[in-house]
Amino acid sequence: MNRINSVTPEIHALLNIFFNIGLMSTLMSLGWIFLINKYWPLKNIEETETIWDEKTTRLLERFAF
């Protein structure tokens, strides 16, 4: 057995843990993005700008001197 290319069982377990954590977090992130897009889809730009303009106008009117 070539010692240069061999990995000890401890290192193998550690790498396995890192890989599993990375895979789990990636899948959870993708699942979260899917759920957000399914139940709270993005509005089109015109609606978003209109809502933003109305909120900004109300804030400016409220705090105007």
Image (cartoon, rainbow, N blue to C red):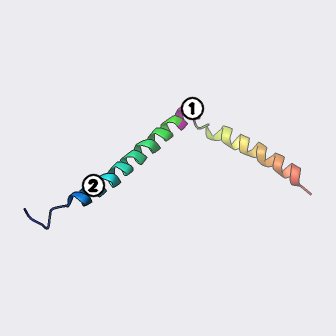
Identify which residue, 25 or 60, lies in the foreground: 25
| Main SS, magenta residues | helix
Q: Which residues are magenta?
A: 36-41
Farthest-out residue, bottom: 4
Q: Are marks 2 and 1 in contact (CB under 8 Å)?
A: no
Looking at the rendered structure, the secondary structure element under dot 1 is: helix
Say which amino acid is labelled 2. Ala
Farthest-out residue, front: 10
Mark 2 — residue? 13
Q: Residue at x 61, y 37 (%)?
A: 44
Mark 1 — residue? 39
Q: Earlier in the sequence, mark 2 or mark 1?
A: 2
Q: Residue at x 51, y 35 (%)?
A: 35
**Left or right of 1 on screen, residue 62:** right
Looking at the rendered structure, the secondary structure element under dot 2 is: helix
Farthest-out residue, right: 65
Residue 31 is situated, as x and y percent measured from the top left of the image, at: 46, 38
